[in-house]
Image (cartoon, grey):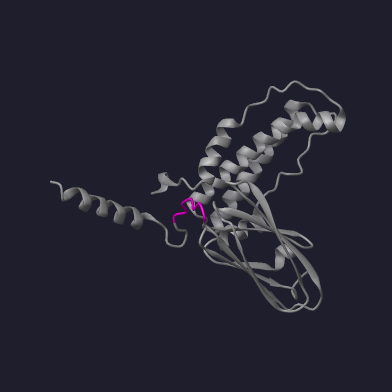
Amino acid sequence: MKPFIPVFLIFLLILCYGKLDNQYPYTDYFPNGKGLVRFHFVNVTDTSNYTCWYNTQLPSGQSVERFCINSDSLIEFEVKATKPTINYLHENSPAQFMVLPNDTIEIFIDRKKVSSLAEIISFKGKTAIISEYLTQAKMWLYDYFPAKEELPENYNSRIDSASISALGKLDDFNDNYKLPEWFIEYEKMDIVSHCEKLKQMQYNQRYWKYNQFVENNTVQASKIKEKEIKINRGIWISHI
């Protein structure tokens, strides 16, 4: 019976691999993983300054890349992608993209088309469709602040509505463009977690912005954040 064990394990590995989507491969945690970001600038007729910054986890930090473009150019650099790393590009308008550990994201910027960066940027690579969503379809909630006369429960209700809208935009995009299942789970958790954090942050914001002191009795987001951290570390076992 002993030979059966390694044979069974090999069969199990083959079965697991067969269930993986080759277009959106399994994204495990890489302690020293790096991703390559490659920009292609075409039809450049003026000078533009670009800033690309990204956050890292374990250790926590932020790195910044800056470059000036005045002609058609190819710019590339490595990022420390120890988790599915979300990166940011900013010029006249922001864009966001994702690069996975040990992978490359190709970013094409055509300066001839229009002035809005989100409309002239395109992507190529395993995370291209994710980057399209992040740049053109994701509903950002970072500027949702409580109004001075707005009651905390009314603000919480407004944030809940915003959360529903953001999840709806994710579903609408996924209906037209197939997103990987692991990213949908990650994004839904990120939206819900962020909205819960906004509910918590409103009390500090009211204090420093309006000199208001309101008792904090909102729902704690610790359990949501704990699950989000697990997802960030690449625990996609449920999809194998």
Q: Quadrant of residue 116?
A: bottom right
Q: Residue at x 51, y 44 (%)?
A: 231
Q: Is residue 89 above or below residue 216?
A: below
Q: 54 left or right of 233?
A: right
Can residue 157 be seen? no
User: Magenta residues, as a range?
Assistant: 26-32
**In magenta segment, residue 220:** no
**SS majority, magenta:** loop
Can residue 10 be seen? yes
Q: Quadrant of residue 177?
A: bottom right
Q: Residue at x 21, y 53 (%)?
A: 7
* Residue 98 on image: x %, y %: 59, 57
* Residue 52 on image: x %, y %: 70, 60
Q: How many marks?
A: 0
Q: Residue at x 75, y 65 (%)?
A: 50
Residue furthest right in the image: 210
Q: 93 left or right of 127?
A: right
**In magenta segment, residue 29:** yes
